[in-house]
Image: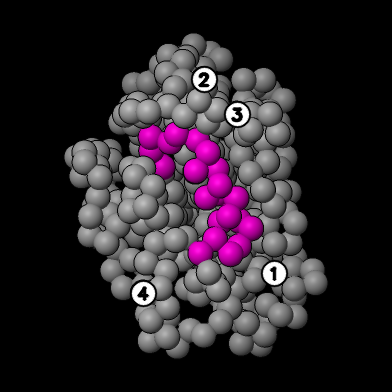
Amino acid sequence: MLPIPPRPAAAERAAVIEELARAYPSLSLTLLGRSILGREIPLLKIGEGKTHLLYVGAHHGAEGMTAAFLLSFLSEFLSAHRAGRSVEGIDPGFLLSVRTLWIVPTLNPDGVELVERGLSSAGFLSERIRHMNGGSEDLSTWQANARGVDLNHNYDAGFRAYKGVEASLGIVGGGPTRYSGEYPESEPETAALARFVRSVPLSMILTLHTQGREIYFTSGGRSLSGQAAVAARFSAMTGYRVAAPEGAAAYGGLTDWAVGRMGIPSFTIECGEGKNPLPESAFASAWREIRPLLFRAPLYAAPPEKQKGDAGREYRTL
Ligand SMILES: [Zn+2]
């Protein structure tokens, strides 16, 4: 198995995904969509169960390590499955018969590439990005996509209210972080993910960010029935604090939209500790913390009350 770099760039992720797909035919690989710059956003699937979960990494450019967490999880899960071995108290074979796991390692491939490879990775948008970055070529903390939209503020949750918050922060257009875009789902990355979320009867979403060792699960201070208890279990598994989003973080995120508008129990996991982008040396301890959660979260996903007949079909056949 190829080693998985702690902060993989696009080519490294593609190589790992290709090798996983070759080694494990039970892994299906499809395309969620494409980024502004045309980069592929792979969607991986394992399992054939009726209860569906979605794990999403790297909404933010400087959080590319979350893709390494998800690929490490997948690699270890599939290897244990093949060996008939339990892991974290989970029998992978049984789990795959009762759960379907969808994984998007990197929702924002352009943002990650800007952080990992710099301005030259942005092609025809390089000049515009330099301008949005105040003339600087230092993109090491860039969080947005290649159009300067912060994808985790681009969902249809508190969008109008957030425009007021943006103004108070002095944000009037595209930039490295926190600009929500012209309208909800204006970006190809968020539009593709939202379309997927609407098409598959998801029972749970985990969205991985760095950093802070915290778990968020509310929308406007409210959550779905049972979510607080599940968050408490996740907190016990990881040692992470359950917290409520504050300030700008409380608007327009995937968890906010999924809980508040779609009725899907969703959890934002702020992995690890330090300053974004976390250095490669931060990988091992953060991985140790969230590993049990990635393996065990499917146990806490309740079967959907109503199955949509064709749900997910198009994503199996792309
Ligand atoms: Zn983030």
The span shown in magenta is: 184-205
Circle number at residue 118: 1
Report the front residue among 107 and 263: 263
Classify residue 161 as left or right of residue 109.
left
Q: Position of residue 3 (x, y in %)?
A: 63, 38
Sequence-first tag of 2 and 4: 2
Residue picked out by circle 4: 161
User: What residue is shown at x 42% (from left), y 18% (from top)?
Assistant: 98
Q: Quadrant of residue 273?
A: bottom left
User: What residue is shown at x 42% (from left), y 69% (from top)?
Assistant: 159
Report the front residue among 105 and 240: 105
Circle number at residue 48: 2
Sequence-first tag of 1 and 2: 2
Residue picked out by circle 3: 313
27 relative to 237, above or below = above
Q: CA distance from mark 1 to mark 3?
A: 38 Å
Sequence-first tag of 2 and 3: 2
Q: Amino acid at mark 2?
A: Glu
Q: CA distance from mark 2 to mark 3?
A: 12 Å
Q: CA distance from mark 1 to mark 2?
A: 40 Å
Q: Amino acid at mark 4?
A: Ala
Q: Position of residue 191 (x, y in %)?
A: 58, 55
User: What residue is shown at x 45% (from left), y 34% (from top)?
Assistant: 201
Q: Is residue 175 visible?
A: yes
Q: Nearer the viewer, mark 2 or mark 3?
A: 3
Sequence-first tag of 3 and 4: 4
